[in-house]
């Protein structure tokens, strides 16, 4: 859908936002870590069998305070993209994320996650190694953490593979990011047996930041420079830094128990207005 | 068990009488999709809907499955009147739901409730593939979460028979969020020392596999059940080749370390009662 990139800065269609969210020049977790954090130490490997580079995580300073940073890495050039499997993590990637989050909790470090994936990798080996179990455990673990967890959907937030890093006290979205139950192509293919109707799917899926704020799925929208974050990453980083600082300050005032309860209540309420008593 | 068999027999006898009076059409002859042999309704009804020739497990409705397992075929259903509000204003969805509710006499793709199993009070749920392939929308997520929270408060063991084609497309992101909601509830339940037995039935895929279904203390599966995250078609599209026979079957999951046991329907009840007993719930005299 790259031909959907807009010429002007009018109100964008959902399909245009999907195109911006997938733009190869869009800043990812590596660029964000470079710009907003210092002294980054990358933690690698799942402590069991391998290191999945499509999940990047480690310890860094955020305005002088030790924090844990995690995100989906898509890669900046073709070699990196192939190595990162285009941002689609394996079960080992999610298990690496889990051990990094456990360490964060042990040392009381707040966690920032930067989500940008079309989804978890749907391959044979991923199935053999328990992709479903790995995602489920990540979600379960995140729901129990006693440290502040702040998640930013930066580009594509695709399906359970995105949710596995997005169970936070605060979930924010960049203005042109998208977050959905699966890709518009997959959605069109399942529902209408026609993946070429992806643009149409974008409109009915309610996947833009604005839609999700209205549905109560996210807590805030981080504005992007005109034309999208790739047009002026420095401008984005400045806004992002301000917003993350504010969120961390407010969550830092909460006790461990309050943080866990706050997160539980937040996700417990998801879909509360989507059910009613009816006649069967 | 005897109760449910008697009930089923009565239903069948009533059907037979109707047939003889010419007021109902002949029951269609069917064949087992696994072995191809001709079967009739009685064969299946008397055998927990398992093919008597090859052991193929036919699908079960959610209530039917629960009644088949619990003491005296009785359970108290909870939140049975919850229905979807169509949160995304999705075209044609309310009509589709209304038709399925009329057909299945169920609010959505799940039944939840309280029952006794081997004399032990349990919280029990089953998903229903007749209802939009047991996809997880807000109703499935909400009913299951309420059941888990009740089990947490009342210290009841939790048994969930999972099945799912995945997310409820028509509820989009709300469907995705049910993964977080149910998993968080399971986490709390587990934190309070609760016993959760998760049973995979055919098929369990997508967001259900990637949330509550994979978070059990004990994982069981019905023979031949398809269990995975990505569906076979998606994987085949990704890798550009056909999957080998038996890929993502219950037996495959056993071999790869994700289920404790593959349990045929005929032994499911006694296996669950034994597991309750091994966790200090109920006496050994119930174990058959």
Image (tube, rainbow, N blue to C red):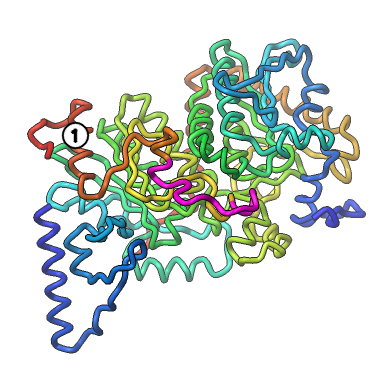
- Residue A28 spot, x, y in % from top left: 78, 33
Q: Looking at the figure, which quarter contains the C terminus of chain B? A: top left
Q: Quarter-wise, where is residue B220 in the image?
A: top left
On screen, residue A226 versus residue B128, left or right, reads right
* Residue in view at x 68 percent, y 12 percent: A66
Mark 1, secondary structure of its residue: helix
According to the picture, the residue beneath numbered tag 1 turns out to be B274
So how many labels did they put on this image? Answer: 1
On screen, residue A263 versus residue B265, left or right, reads right
* Residue in view at x 70 percent, y 57 percent: A202
On screen, residue A96 versus residue A152, left or right, reads left
* Placement of B72 over or under A136, stated as above or below: below
Residue interval drawn in magenta = B236-252
Asked if the stretch drawn in magenta spans residue B138, the answer is: no
Tell me the subunit letter for badge 1: B
* Residue in view at x 88 percent, y 46 percent: A227
Asked if the stretch drawn in magenta spans residue B240, the answer is: yes
- Residue A172 spot, x, y in % from top left: 68, 36
Label 1: how many residues lie within 10 Å, few (<14), some (14-19) or many (20+)?
Answer: many
Q: Quarter-wise, where is residue A45 in the image?
A: top right
Which one is nearer the viewer's eye here, A37 or A129? A129
Q: Which residue lies furthest to the bottom in this view?
A: B22
- Residue A123 in view in this figure: yes
- Residue A147 in view in this figure: no
Which one is nearer the viewer's eye here, B269 or A18? B269
* Placement of A90 over or under B95, stated as above or below: above
On screen, residue B137 versus residue A175, left or right, reads left
- Residue A221 spot, x, y in % from top left: 72, 39
- Residue A242 spot, x, y in % from top left: 78, 26
* Residue in view at x 73 percent, y 22 percent: A245
Which one is nearer the viewer's eye here, B38 or B181? B38
């Amino acid at each position: 859908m790259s031909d959907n990139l807009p010429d002007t800065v009018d109100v964008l269609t959902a399909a245009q936002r999907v195109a911006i969210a997938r733009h190869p020049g869009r800043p990812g977790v590596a660029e964000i870590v470079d710009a907003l954090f210092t002294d980054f130490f990358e933690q690698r490997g799942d402590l069991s069998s391998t290191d999945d580079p499509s999940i990047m995580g480690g310890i860094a300073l955020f305005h002088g305070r030790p924090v844990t940073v995690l995100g989906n890495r898509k890669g900046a050039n073709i070699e990196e993209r192939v190595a990162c499997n285009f941002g689609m993590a394996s079960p080992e990637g999610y298990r690496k994320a889990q051990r990094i989050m456990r360490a964060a909790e042990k040392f009381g470090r707040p966690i920032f996650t930067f989500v940008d994936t079309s989804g978890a990798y749907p391959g044979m080996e991923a199935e053999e190694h328990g992709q479903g179990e790995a995602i489920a455990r990540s979600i379960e673990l995140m729901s129990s953490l006693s440290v502040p967890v702040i998640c930013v959907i930066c580009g594509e937030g695709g399906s359970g593979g995105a949710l596995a890093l997005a169970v936070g006290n605060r979930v924010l979205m960049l203005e042109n990011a998208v977050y959905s139950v699966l890709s518009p192509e997959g959605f069109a293919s399942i529902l209408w047996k026609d993946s070429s109707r992806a643009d149409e799917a974008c409109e009915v899926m309610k996947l833009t930041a604005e839609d999700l704020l209205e549905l109560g799925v996210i807590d805030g929208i981080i504005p992007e420079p005109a034309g999208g974050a790739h047009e002026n990453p420095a401008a984005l980083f400045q806004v992002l830094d301000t917003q993350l600082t504010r969120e961390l300050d407010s969550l830092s005032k909460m006790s461990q128990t309050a943080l866990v309860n706050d997160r539980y209540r937040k996700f417990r309420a998801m879909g509360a207005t989507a059910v009613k008593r009816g006649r069967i | 068990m005897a109760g449910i068999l008697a009930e089923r027999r009565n239903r069948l006898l009533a059907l037979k009488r109707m047939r003889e009076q010419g007021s109902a059409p002949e029951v269609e002859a069917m064949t087992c999709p696994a072995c191809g042999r001709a079967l009739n309704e009685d064969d299946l009804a008397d055998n927990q809907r398992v093919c008597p020739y090859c052991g193929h497990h036919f699908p079960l409705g959610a209530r039917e499955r629960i009644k088949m397992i619990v003491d005296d075929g009785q359970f108290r259903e909870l939140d049975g009147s919850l229905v979807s509000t169509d949160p995304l204003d999705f075209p044609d969805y309310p009509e589709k739901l209304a038709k399925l509710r009329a057909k299945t006499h169920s609010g959505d793709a799940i039944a939840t409730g309280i029952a006794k199993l081997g004399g032990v009070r349990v919280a029990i749920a089953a998903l229903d593939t007749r209802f939009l392939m047991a996809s997880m929308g807000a109703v499935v997520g909400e009913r299951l979460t309420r059941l888990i929270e009740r089990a947490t408060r009342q210290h009841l063991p939790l048994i969930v028979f999972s099945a799912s084609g995945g997310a409820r497309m028509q509820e989009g992101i709300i469907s995705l969020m049910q993964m977080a909601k149910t998993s968080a509830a399971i986490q709390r339940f587990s934190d309070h020392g609760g016993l959760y037995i998760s049973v995979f039935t055919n098929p369990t895929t997508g967001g259900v596999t990637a949330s509550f279904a994979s978070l059990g203390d004990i994982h069981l599966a019905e023979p031949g059940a398809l269990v995975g995250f990505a569906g076979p078609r998606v994987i085949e599209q990704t890798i550009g080749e056909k999957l080998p026979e038996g890929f993502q079957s219950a037996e495959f999951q056993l071999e790869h370390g994700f289920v404790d046991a593959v349990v045929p329907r005929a032994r499911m009840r006694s296996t669950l009662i034994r597991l309750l007993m091994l966790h200090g719930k109920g006496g050994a005299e119930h174990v058959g």
